[in-house]
Image (spheres, rainbow, N blue to C red):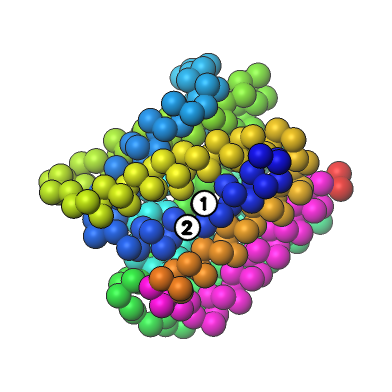
Amino acid sequence: MPARLAILAAAFLFSTGGAVIKAAQLNAWQLASYRSLVAGAVLLALLPAARQGWTWRMVPVGVAYALTLVSFVLATKLTTSANAIFLQATAPLYLLFIAPWWLGERWRPRDLLGPMAIAMGMTLFFVGREPTVLTAPNPWLGNLCGAASGFTWALTVAGLRWLNRGGIVAGNATAAMGNLLAGLFAFAPALPIPAFTGADVAVLLYLGVFQIGLSYYLLNRGLARVPAFEASVLILLEPALNPVWTYLFHGEQPSTLAMIGGGIIGAATLLQSWLSARE
């Protein structure tokens, strides 16, 4: 498969997560736990690099990624898919503070443009009152979980840079570890184990095998051959399509302010990637 098509296919599979999570009868903790356990096993099976080079230095990064996975599922169950995916995309805002503290990376005045725009877009998710619908029963709490997933994703990105500086190329191994840890973290709140229906099993297998496992495999293949900026543009297909699937399959319509905020966050992220690529 051509590298660019592999990245687009990965983004397409990632984008289906919101609609499938909302279709599941399992609660958020059960989905977060069982999905990640399946995904962790699939990543270990599909990616040889995920089975190599495990070290204690990966643990804090794996924990950050595990918290990202769990908080994103909680957000998707509680608020609209659009809100969940765009609030997770606020990671560059948090990196503005995390990178100098953890990595010693200094920022310049022009580096503030993207995060400031992201902060402006993020505030639109928390003003006004969003309608409560069946697929988004607690938008306010869900938005907080979405913002938390953005913060923990920023920690994950900074942690991967920290590992790389130490000579540890551990993106795939960290993804496998993070999924396994997410499965363990969410397991106790997921109890008691439900009586699985055929639909439950199908949802978990799809989320674990295709939406995470196969997606990471395709993304890994594509990133090896596509420049970083071009890859970051192609992967934007995920937040663009995520709300579309939930609208088509569940009739879920995010608020006007949320869509404006999501557009600002997406544009700011693209701008940040372009500025980084120029350098």
The residue to which callout 1 is attached is 13
- Which quarter of the picture shows residue 27? bottom left
| Residue 179 to residue 235: above or below | above
Secondary element under disc 2, as helix, strand or loop, is: loop
**Quarter of the figure that contains the N terminus:** top right
| Residue 249 to residue 212: above or below | below
- Which quarter of the picture shows residue 116? bottom right
**In x, y percent, where is residue 272?**
74, 55
Nearer to me, 207 or 268: 207
**Does residue 264 appear left or right of residue 207 in this picture?**
right
**In x, y percent, where is residue 256?**
54, 82
Secondary element under disc 1, as helix, strand or loop, is: helix
- Is 152 magenta? The answer is no
Q: Residues within 10 Å of mark 2 (few under 14, many from 20)?
A: many
Look at 41% across and 41% down and name the residue there.
Answer: 209
Q: Which residues are magenta?
A: 250-277
Look at 43% across and 60% down and name the residue there.
Answer: 18
Q: Amino acid at mark 1?
A: Leu
Q: Amino acid at mark 2?
A: Thr
* Res 262 visible: yes
**Does residue 189 appear left or right of residue 156 in this picture?**
left
Q: Which mark is residue 4?
A: none
Can you name the residue that lies furthest to the front here?
1
**Does residue 36 appear left or right of residue 245 in this picture?**
left
**In x, y percent, where is residue 134?**
30, 75
Nearer to me, 97 or 186: 186
User: Is the C-beta separation of discs 2 and 1 under 8 Å?
Assistant: yes
Q: Which mark is residue 16?
A: 2
| Residue 260 to residue 31: above or below | below
